[in-house]
Image (tube, grey):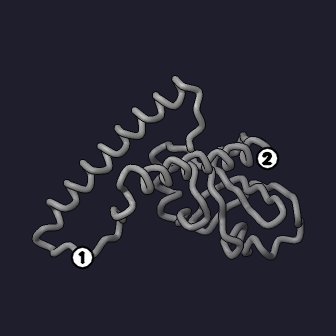
């Protein structure tokens, strides 16, 4: 799993670890690492360390100027962590394409305008819509690869 600094809650990271999913993510600079916010670490601007987050999750943090990438796969090198995190951009491009070209822009996870009695039907329709958008994306991606075109 690759995700940016808005998503790595303690609960999510522990769930990924418990389910044996690998993750590489970025942390906000106020994230406690070894009991101290990352922004207060004096090894700046480049360093890497293995330590514990609040909640007891052991991670490798790779600091590169102003960003802190992290993983619970402690055997990865700093370069491997940075390389994996950069691949997150490919997923972002897919999401952008799904929203702009295939109709997912109006489907947000926290959409609250649906009346409670219609919520289950709405969620089922949403799941089907997302599945159809992903199928359309796969067809487009196959065509793109066959023709040697870029994503755009």
> Dot 1 surroundings within 10 Å: few (below 14), some, or many (20 or more)?
few
Disc 2 versus disc 1: nearer the observer? 1
Q: x%, y% of residue 53?
A: 64, 64
Q: x%, y% of residue 20?
A: 50, 43
Residue lying farthest to the top in this orientation: 146
Q: Nearer the viewer, residue 107 or 17?
A: 107
Q: Answer left or right for 132 relative to 86.
A: left
Asked if residue 26 is positioned above or below residue 36 in the image, the reply reads: above
- Residue that appears at 66% across and 70% down: 28
Looking at the image, how many numbered discs can be counted on the residues? 2
Residue lying farthest to the left in this orientation: 117
Q: Nearer the viewer, residue 56 or 72?
A: 72
- Dot 1 falls on a residue whose secondary structure is loop
C-alpha distance separating marks 2 and 1: 44 Å
Q: Which mark is residue 113?
A: 1
- Residue that appears at 27% across and 50% down: 129
Q: Which mark is residue 78?
A: 2
Q: Answer left or right for 88 relative to 14.
A: right
- Residue that appears at 41% across and 40% down: 137
Q: x%, y% of residue 83?
A: 72, 44
Proximity of marks 2 and 1: CB atoms separated by less than 8 Å:
no
């Amino acid at each position: 799993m690759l995700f940016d600094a808005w998503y790595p809650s303690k609960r999510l990271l522990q769930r990924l670890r418990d389910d044996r999913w690998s993750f590489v993510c970025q942390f906000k600079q106020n994230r406690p690492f070894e009991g101290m916010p990352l922004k207060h670490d004096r090894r700046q601007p480049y360093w890497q360390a293995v330590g514990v987050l609040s909640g007891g999750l052991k991670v490798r943090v790779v600091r590169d100027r102003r960003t802190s990438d992290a993983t619970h796969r402690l055997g990865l090198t700093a370069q491997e962590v940075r390389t994996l995190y950069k691949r997150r951009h490919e997923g972002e491009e897919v999401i952008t394409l799904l929203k702009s070209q295939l109709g997912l822009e109006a489907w947000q996870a926290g959409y609250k305008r649906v009346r409670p009695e219609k919520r289950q039907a709405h969620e089922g329709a949403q799941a089907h819509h997302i599945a159809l958008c992903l199928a359309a994306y796969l067809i487009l991606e196959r065509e793109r690869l066959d023709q040697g075109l870029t994503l755009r």
